[in-house]
Amino acid sequence: MSFVFLTTDILLFLLIAILLVYGIYALRHEHLFRPWKQVVSRPFSMCAVVVLSFYFLIAILDSVHFHPTIESSSGNDVQHSTRITSVLDLVLGSIIAGTEKTYSAPFSIYAFAKETLVDEDGYMVREYPRLKHAGSHLSEPASRLDDILNRSVVGVGKGLIGWIFFCAIIIFMMSRIQKLAIRGIVKKIIRGQSSLSWRTFFLSFGIIFVLVGIGLQLCPHYHVLGTDQVGNDILYQSLKSARTGLIIGTLTTLVMLPFAVIFGVSAGYFGGWVDDSIQYMYTTLSSIPSVLLIAASALMLDVYLANHSEMFVSVTARADLRLLCLCLILGVTTWTGLCRYLRAETLKLRESAYIDASRAFGAVPWTTIWKHVVPNVMHIVTISIVLDFSGLVLAEAALSYLNIGVDPSMESWGNMINGARLELAREPVVWWSLFAAFIFMFVLVLAANIFADAVRDAFDPRLRELN
Amino acid sequence: MSDYLLRRLLYAFPILLGVNIITFFLFFVVNSPDDMARIHLGNKYVTTDAIEKWKGERGYDRPLFYNSEKQGRGKLLDTIFYTKTVKLFVFDFGQSDSGRDIGYDISQRMWPSLMITLPILILGLFLTISLALAVAFFRATYLDTFAVIMCVCMMSVSGLFYIIGGQYLFSKLLKIVPISGFDDGFLAIKFLILPVVVGVVGGLGSGTRWYRTIFLEEVNQDYVRTARSKGLSEKVVFYVHVLRNGMIPILTGVVALLPSLFLGSLITEAFFGIPGLGSYTIEAIQSQDFSIVRAMVFLGSALYILGLVLTDISYTFVDPRISLR
């Protein structure tokens, strides 16, 4: 296979690299490390961290793209398909049951719509046909419930075994690092006396392990969350959508951050005409209602993409560029708030003694800003990054519903809702794709909200207005 | 005061000019009028004559900034920037790309928007303030914790699901109100109930939590301690002192929103088929009508700036310590 790096992939990996560097730096500096320790000492936020990292793992797996190799008949030369797939596709493709003809309910082995079939005696009957993939291993349809139960129990067992191994490895490593007896560590964790809430950490991983275990047992044989109109598995789509949501939530902040920090800090630090022009710029931008600005930009983006269709090698690359542009557009509408706060904070800092001292020593303005101002406003930046995240994930769904969001060919929760909105009018109701989008979004946004609250409380509890 | 207002109005002028330059850049520089014509006429197999005709009919056939063929003032006036952008300043929106009068359409369609957004604002404000006050009253108890958890959960649900769930529950299962649509006069009420209920419920989580923090900040102030030490009951302290002082940031925050109520909500109006300005914008996006989108962006920013001025004025009313100079 030959790897492909889409623009958003590169940016996502860049973001992860930045986070890693920051993490290593923070580990060595107590004042940076302590707030984070405080965040994960609360059980709720520890659980949120585990959930968020699970979503990120999915998104990262889905961001390693490549052209799969085609088995060529000659056997010598290696050929690559023009299709772009990701590691997640590869993993899920081997786990999740194949595509059906049309809708099917969760765990159903029959299709949603009746078809004309020929029965054993040669008569034509209108019946619900069996699905091609789901439940095809069952000879007796009546044994479906037993089969599901059996498989779930096995799945729970396997999940628990995996979880115990996982716990054992972590606890072993903890005992090595802290140089304590394993017995003592386990006792501390179970009683909830450890400084970080390790008990919640292991319990939340336990739930994830059990869910994954059940999924691994059931997914190859059933559509756990049903299928959509063209027969695609809903669980597969929901997992693929995680990348879109996370990219919107993180890259938007990443692309707007340099502008917000540079403009905000220099407006506050230099004052005068610099301050005036930067204030004018962000007042103008923020005076346009964001949804209208997004709508206008998305409309223009559509026209641009339609007129420059020759620029793109594949549908995936085109959808990717559109996703990036959406991040840029959302970034333009969200940076003004952060910029305003940074300016106000810098105005306060400018009067402090250590800035005066830095100036008195003859440091050029940018050195003072970089060494003394920026580190002291970073807590605002951190808080606003995590606070914006959940709003951006929700905004993606709403914008995709209005057809001004991500490309229709891209899996996203907004597109799932958009495609399923008329299905509630059917009889019987097709509820499962909305349900899946709801659950996946709700868990992510809830985790993000809890995490954001904890981060704000740890870094600056007085900073209520940023909400 | 009047000096201040005059200054604010003058300050609004460069901001609106900036907005105009941004929209102009978006609509005429990122994509030339030729590009837009091609999209409208069906992309690839379009003759240059057809493009020229389309541009001529809509007045896009002028130069962007400077018309060297004209005499005198015409050099600047007979350009796209002047005819399409500067005229927005006097709220002359001109014609849409499909030939309708935008100003008339807006004046017709802002009322249905207002009929939804105003009840949502008033009912929502009443409900969230009462709830937040109750939660603040029971602060640091299990009830408070439970309420905050509920708020965070409600905040984490996408607004789309409130609408879909509401339509499914009240219109499809219970058949109390129609799913979507609109009617003139008083007949509109049955179409308005559901969007208003959904809008209020959707904003309950974040609103209650936000107002709770405002009230909690007030509770810790000195004047509350003084009121208690005078022997006032906790109820009187809350409903008279805390509520009044907490209302200052709440009301001034609401005043900023008032003018924007005319714009309506894009999502709500799309779901419920309400012929307001929100659905007007969506229709314009879907039919790629650039003039309407441009007009709406301008109108939106003008209303936002008006909201800021109103906020400043409202401060002087509720807080006598502030005076505008």
Image (tube, coloured by chain):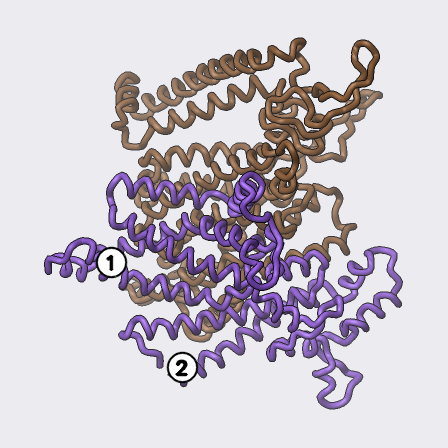
Chain colours: A brown, B purple
Measured along the vertical axis of the image, is residue B106 above or below residue B71?
Answer: above
* For residue A424, above or below residue B64: above
Residue A367 placed where, x, y %? 40, 60
Indicate which label's residue lies in the foreground, 2 or 1. Answer: 1
- The local secondary structure at tag 2 comes to helix
Q: Residue B239 carries which label?
A: 1
Image quarter hosting the C terminus of chain B: bottom left
Q: Which amino acid does label 1 sit on?
A: Tyr
Residue A296 visible in the current orientation: no
Using residue B82 as the reference point, say whether residue A32 is left or right of it. Answer: left
The spot of residue A140 in percent (x, y) is: 65, 9
Kindly identify which chain the residue marked by label 2 belongs to: B
Identify which residue is drawn at 62% across, 69% down. Answer: B108
What's the chain of the residue with tag 1? B
Q: Position of residue A162 (x, y in %)?
A: 46, 17
| Residue sitting nearer the eye, A277 or B152 | B152
Residue A120 to residue B120: above or below = above
State which quadrant residue A138 falls in: top right
Who's the residue at 57% across and 54% down the image?
A: B191
* Residue under pointer 2: B4
- Number of numbered callouts drawn: 2
How far, Cα to Cα, is label 2 from label 1? 35 Å
Q: Residue furthest front?
A: B187
Q: Inspect the image, locate mark 2, and give the three-letter code of the amino acid beneath it.
A: Tyr
Q: Using the rendered image of the protein, determine whether residue A163 is visible from the camera's viewpoint.
A: yes
